[in-house]
Amino acid sequence: MIGELLDRAIAPWAPKAALERMHARSVIMAYEAARPSRTHKAIRETRSADAALQPALQSIREQVRALEENHDLVTGLFDRMDERVVGGPGIAVEPIPLRYDGTVHTAFAEAIKAAWAEWSLKPEASGELTRPQVERLVCRTWLRDGEALAQMLQGSVPGYEHLTSVPFALELLEPDYLPLGYNDFSNGIVQGVERNAWRRVKAYHLLKEHPGNLGSLSFGQSTKRVPAEQMIHIAHRKRIGQNRGVPLLHSVLIRLADIKDYEESERVAARISAALVMYIKKGTPDDFVMPGVGQQQAHRSFNFAPGMVFDNLLPGEEVGTVESNRPSPFLEGFRNGQLKAIAAGARSTYSSVARSYDGTYSAQRQELVEGQLGYDLLQHEFIDYWCRPVYRAWLRMAVMSGHLKLPPDVNPLTLYGAFYQGPVMPWINPVHEATAWELLVKAGFADEAEVARSRQRNPSELKASRTAEIQQNREAGLVFSSDYYHQTYGIKQGNEPTDGNKEPADVDAATRVDGNGNQSGE
């Protein structure tokens, strides 16, 4: 803009120089997209991530909250995100502490799992929510509001009594507790977050109560400084250096609002068209007689019934009806097109947002596979931001408090090793999926644990359950196709091999069965 004004100023005095400047500018702006025009506004964003969010974040967050409260599509979208990112049982944690020789210390792993299961019943400060409920609520807040916070209550805390044997709890906080307008640049505080010169978070400055609480004052509230080591801040960031998180639906808010308004208009129009409205046309103006002074025009009413013949019209009158061709036949096509765009911007799938599953098998599977990639990305971010910090802080406190005794043969460097398992892509065709996994395991390209995790089962728990089940069946003399070894070698109670031989020596050949369960004799 400044360059153009300068060109116009020097053009009358040095037209050649002005022409050269204009030519140079056109060469620099060689990309057509960089040239503003009547049809292309070329809107640009030159501010930093924090500067762009400062005036907009609160409005966007409040709009998304209002839509979730009042818009069924938004409620359903976040419900599906809860299901696919966290799931009903929450993010499963499978501890993998190793010995110095690299093998898994199963006994200590079982002790960690038992303590973790006990803590998962009441992990948060109020004691009202279980760990899966906490994870779903935090995930929903993270995606809806753009961020969520939790203060870790570790060890002895004044005025608080821990509800579990491990002195560790979480105080869940909405992002409103972190004031967006609290800035002190001299002390490195931007939007309530205090950082050092290398942008490492040092502390969070939190309000002592929610600014929207009943009876609370939205202005003039005091804050408290909480060290970063005591806080967990999960944020949905889109730019490098972004201080606060942005809601997942920030780019599709206008479309969602348009759909809601358009559907409301169509519903009102449909209600109007459903009401039969009639009028009486008087004919020519000469047929209409004005009532005299002091007189009122007589009110006429007609009773209608199916199949009746109406013959009470005056000369020159005729009956007409007010028709409305609503709802519009284009409503569904417009709505579906908008929902596809919303699904693209919300890292979801059209079928999930619209709850429409009328496509072909191939199309549904392709959509499921591509959509699962988006869910997996959010799931890994949730694990990195939330699950792993929570589990490690809890385990550290469990060991420090003496609730868990670290065995001498456990490598301390592997203490926090764990496998985190969230919801996986459901099987569309179980027969084909099971056959594919079986071939992969037989060929050595996968293991049994991977198959168990693909069905959202804990491998060690599944193994223990199968061992107990097979043992009970053998003790009861039951033979099922799932016990392939029992079928193949005809093992009866008390005949299990104990010397490592492939086949027990004392099994009668007459009772041996083959892999199909058929007996074979000599």
Image (cartoon, helix red, strand yellow):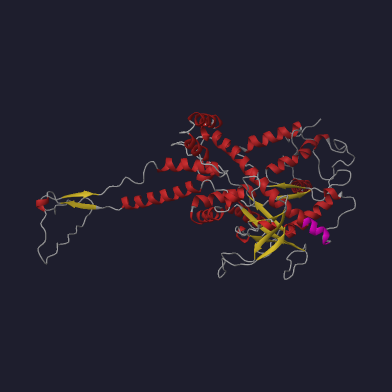
Name which residue lies at 68% across and 57% down. Answer: 186
Relative placement, left or right, of 378 versus 20 is: right
Location of the C terminus (image quadrant) = top right
Q: Is residue 66 visible?
A: yes
- Residue 286 in the figure: left or right of residue 217: left
Q: Residue at x 71, y 35 (%)?
A: 438
Residue 307 at x, y = what percent? 21, 50
Q: Nearer the viewer, residue 321 or 148?
A: 148
Picture residue at 18% right of the left edge, 52% below the top: 280
Position in image of residue 118 (x %, y %)? 74, 59
Tell me residue 344's x, y (percent).
Answer: 54, 41
- x%, y% of residue 211? 58, 64
Determine if the magenta segment contains residue 396: yes
Residue 482 at least partly seen: no
Q: Nearer the viewer, residue 159 or 189?
A: 189
| Image: magenta residue range | 394-401
User: What secondary structure is the magenta-colored segment mainly?
Assistant: helix
* Quadrant assignment, res 38: top left
**In-front residue for pair 114/397:** 397
Picture layout, residue 49 above or below residue 164: above
Q: Camera-side residue: 174 or 325?
A: 174
